Amino acid sequence: MHEKSKVRSRRSFLKGSAAVLTGSVVAGSSQASDPDPLITELQDWASSTGVGVDETPYGMPISFESHVVRRNVEWLTADPISSINFTPIHALDGTITPQGCAFERHHSGAIELRKEDYRLMINGLVDRELVFTYDDLERFPRENHVYFCECAANTGMEWAGAQLNGAQFTHGMIHNMEYTGIPLRALLNEAGADISSDKWVYVEGADASSNGRSIPMEKALDDVLVAFKANGEALRMEHGYPVRLVVPGWEGNMWVKWLRRIEVSDAPVESREETSKYTDVLEDGSARKWTWVMDAKSVITSPSPQMPIKHGAGPMVISGLAWSGHGQITRVDVSKDGGITWETARLGKQGDKKALTRFYLDTNWDGAPMLLQARAMDDTGYVQPTKEQLRNQRGENSVYHNNCIQTWYVNTQGIAENVEVS
Amino acid sequence: MSKFLNLSIPVFGGIALLIGLAFGMSSRNHNAEKIETLETRLAQISEHASNAEKATKVQSDRAVELETKLAEIEEVYAELAKNGSDLTQAAPAVPGTLGIGRPAHAKEIAAWDVDVLPDGRGLPEGSGDVFVGEEVFAEKCAACHGDFAEGVDNWPVLAGGFDTLADKDPVKTVGSYWPHLSTAWDYINRSMPFGAAGTLTPDETYAIVAYILYSNDLVDDEFVLSKDNFSEFEMYNKDGFVIDDRPATEYANWQGEPCMSDCKDEVNITMRSVFLVDTPPEGGSDSVPNMATIDGLPSFTKEGPSFIPVAEEKPVEENVEKASLATPSAEVAGTADLIKAGKKVFKKCSACHQVGDKAKNRSGPVLNGIVGRTFGTVDGFKYSKVFKAAAEEGRVWDEANLAEFLKKPKAYMKQTKMSFSGLKKDEDLMAIIEYLKSTGQ
């Protein structure tokens, strides 16, 4: 299948490539022939003064990082007001997503709602139908938790094959923040809600899309938060300021923003977002509904299409993110040959339950092409499936809940591309 | 426990002192009346003492209870501390209520609690028929959803698509997919029209829903939808859904110790990314079709890649420096940039004109393949007289006359209906013409 003339042994390639690769090695990483003027010459920043403390009351990332931004794909949706953008996960490290570059999904645009104008109603099957102000909410005992929020459609385009070239675009509908908020159960208790297990909690947003989702009582009493802070500061407008719902491990659409109403009910509403959307069509045309949990998943963020290897062969770090809506990530394996051989990666630190975990494979690149894959396992014993396994199970029309193993083809220049493999 | 017992000793001591005093007084004074009074007083005091003793007993029992509990908690903390844990705790559950918040007013609940359930609960009084629905739909919905609910551009298609759910590209509409009619009523009532949510009257919503059912051939044109007949209506795909069965159908298969070596004999690349994505500094992204094929890529075995591709793919090498993955050649790149720029310029036209596969005539004709086409010949578009005349003359659009027209439409084609003042910049003209050339036929 390949031209014979092109076939060379790996060893001869490595010898031959050494010279080529050295050429692209940046100054400083090998014996420098000339002294580096950045060191030997007095630099302006080392001599004159910088910016004062009154210059930047609230800081943005330095201009050199201006490419690390959320990006949208115009043709995906009819209008940017009802659309999505993607977190630049390829360029981030650690686990916490800064709010300013955490992906957004709106159905009728992000709204400006002042704390003073904020009201939260709880009604339905409760002893006391109540209205809370924002200040009221801050009087309830509160908790801090780190959780990931993943859109159910993250990686959804990949059902039909490798589509967009970039981890930001294939896996960027996710963010991970530390939330401060009140357990939903505290508000249910305050209202004297009927908390029997066959009851539902319908939650609804204040924006024009009026996004509403039905949550079974068991989950509502478990770990759902009514949150007003993220990463220590107020929520951003685009994430539901002043108050959003946090539904750990479950699809992002349920994390209702600008939360305005909580209704205890004896049945699910079967709203638009839980029937016509966020339901998963299977191969036979039937569809799954109430597929709330986000199964275990991982992706290599670097190298990836937007993060080529620039240093040539040698020591390097393969890094990525793993998460599970069922609990904790216990292990991530990385393959460099498309799944023939796997190595267990190092977890940056033990991830919280239902939060992003950072993994690293500290390795040596020999300069040969690679097929990079990551495979996550969680504390329920679940092993992230391949694309093929998922398709065999569900077909290609599910749109949502694609947690397949992703493959990046890395060529000899270190450039990575989104591919599918046999 | 000890704290309470210590406290109780001075209390008893005080009572004994009182009693002793009382006896002393009585022995010095033999006044019988006084004795009687004192005895009564003594009885009262003893009774008080006995009551106090009982109360103290209750309190001390309670104290024992609390002390035991405290000891248990201390033990737990000691255990936690020993294991290196800290004092973090979930927010405490509050027994009873905190009394925060105020009662909701009935009118407030009525204003916000408007969701409608599948059984029709939550529906207001009212009704609407297909004819009124068609009018309301044309006025308030058709700009996005099309006159026949067929969907414009990427906006949702609301009608048709029956029996396509098992196809390669299922068409999920209200008719073909939605299991409950209540969902349509509820969503339209609360969230539509886009940009003016919450402004429809109940009758308008009934009418729109009736019209959407009609567009789906699910009712005839006489149909009237009302609160009374609402819950009788059964949707086409009502039985099309199963509750999440992943735990039963999938989880057991994807468990256990996964394979670590020799997991496959050979791995081949079967598909490359459909789009390369350019990420310009000004934000957003540009998807560029990826022309690269899977030919000439290595296959992988446990020995490594089958061969090392020679580094002759020059364009790719350039890409590393440019951080752009789509520059086949300078000339093509120049054209690509122009097309990209032209696409932006076209936004000025897109209120009236459409291009692309799904393009339809709006207040202006479809512009696919305009360059090289005879004037005034798009099927189904009602042209002005001046364009009809040009069509009869057989005049053909080329880059030059199109540029002249777009520069000042009313100068080039007097009496054209096109109410556009023109593109002043030459680069905009070049860009839009290049873009229109790229739109095919």
Image (cartoon, grey):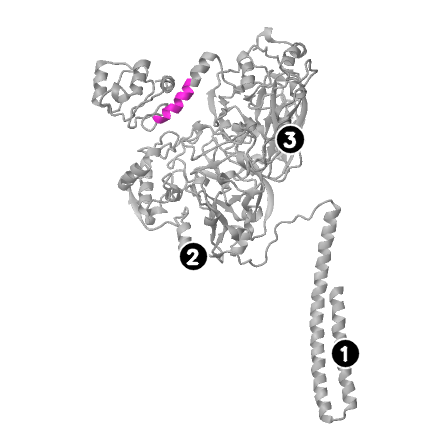
Question: Which of these two is toward me, B250 or A37?
Answer: A37
Q: Position of residue B358 (x, y in %)?
A: 36, 25
Query: Which residue position holds label 1?
Result: B16
Q: Position of residue A356 (x, y in %)?
A: 60, 35
Left or right of residue B312, residue B10 in this image: right
Instruction: Please tell me whether residue B183 belongs to the stretch shown in magenta.
Output: no
Query: Which residue position holds label 3?
Result: A359
Task: Assess disc 1: are there few (<14), some (14-19) or many (≥20) residues with their C-alpha within 10 Å of its C-alpha.
Answer: some
- In the rendered image, the vertical position of residue B75 relative to residue A355, given as above or below: below
Q: Chain of mark 3?
A: A
Q: Distance between the Cα atoms at labels 2 and 1? A: 62 Å
Q: Do discs 1 and 3 share a chain?
A: no
Whether residue B220 can be seen here = no
Q: Distance between the Cα atoms at labels 1 and 3? A: 75 Å
Secondary-structure class at tag 2? loop
- Disc 2 residue type? His
Query: Which residue position holds label 2?
Result: B105
Report the label total. 3
Left or right of residue A234, residue B140 in this image: left
Q: Chain of mark 1?
A: B
The part of the chain drawn in magenta is: B338-348
